[in-house]
Image (cartoon, rainbow, N blue to C red):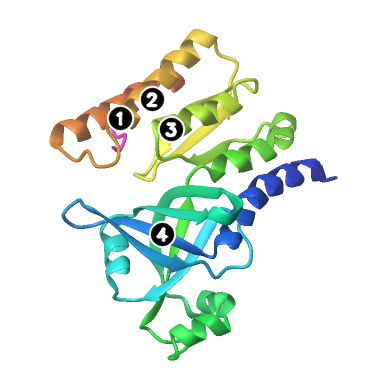
Amino acid sequence: MQTDTRETESFDASHDKLWEIIKGCRYGMLTTIEEDGSLRARPMTTVQKEFGGTLWLFAPTHCDAARAVEANEQVCVAYANASKADFMCLSGTASIVTHTAIKEKLWTPMVQAWFPQGPASHDVALIKIDVEGTELAVLEGAMRTISAYRPVLCIEVHTLANLRKVMFVLRHEGYWIIDCLGYSPTYILEPTTVSYLRKAFVHSLWYVRTVFLGGHSSGLAVFIRWYLKRLAQWASTGIWNPTTTR
């Protein structure tokens, strides 16, 4: 099977624009949500040599930033280069990574100066940030393959705005949402030949459900999430599944 390099070039071009700004700034401001709900920004240095939708930042394992990420994964990183008039703000989900092999791969003399104990130390961690919105660049770059092979798609999307953007990109390919897994959340999409009205009804249910994701943890919100998912699955599959998870 031949690979169409134009898809890869489209994907790479989108990320190259972001990476040019990131590496030109070097320092970024990482904003986390604290336990009391307030926002706190900290200067961090980006040490990676390429960008594919994930940012890596070294930090002490038990520092305030790491604790904030463990308590709330939603973060924002802002970069600014006034001399070039480059300004960028990236939001996404963060996690703490302590695998020695990953730390060694990203280790540099500059990092060694900050953490003389070395990458194998349990006191050194990485803050991994999966930047939201880069899924769209991946999707747009893969449209030729999607059109040709019509695969089932699994796409993690955190906001209603980005979910609508995903569906807009796929508008000519006849895809619809058939399920949503986890609290991330990850949407499962497959091609369909159903009518426009039926597809629009199913998507409206999923769109409304996104309003009750995130910080909504009350009993009523949980029930609404569960019921809307159940209803959307019934509208797409014709099966009313009482075992559907929330």
**Secondary-structure class at tag 2:** helix
Q: Is residue 200 above or below residue 141?
A: above
Of badges 2 and 3, the one in the foreground is: 2
Of badges 1 and 4, the one in the foreground is: 4
The answer to whether the residues at label 4 and label 2 have Cβ atoms under 8 Å apart is no
Which amino acid type is marked by label 1?
Val
Q: Earlier in the sequence, mark 3 or mark 4?
A: 4
Q: Is residue 244 magenta?
A: yes
Q: x and y percent of residue 114 in the render?
A: 44, 83
Of badges 4 and 2, the one in the foreground is: 4
Which residue position holds label 1? 211
Magenta range: 242-246
Density class for disc 1 (Cα within 10 Å; few <14, some 14-19, many ≥20) is some
Visible in this render: residue 231? yes
* Marks 3 and 4, how far apart at CA: 36 Å
Which amino acid type is marked by label 4?
Met
**Looking at the image, which residue is at 72% across and 42% down?**
10
Density class for disc 3 (Cα within 10 Å; few <14, some 14-19, many ≥20) is some
Q: x and y percent of residue 111 in the render?
A: 50, 81
Of badges 3 and 4, the one in the foreground is: 4
Q: x and y percent of residue 132 in the render?
A: 47, 45
Which residue position holds label 4? 29
Which amino acid type is marked by label 2?
Tyr
**Secondary-structure class at tag 1:** loop
Q: Quick one: which residue is furthest to the bottom in this view?
A: 117
The answer to whether the residues at label 1 and label 4 have Cβ atoms under 8 Å apart is no
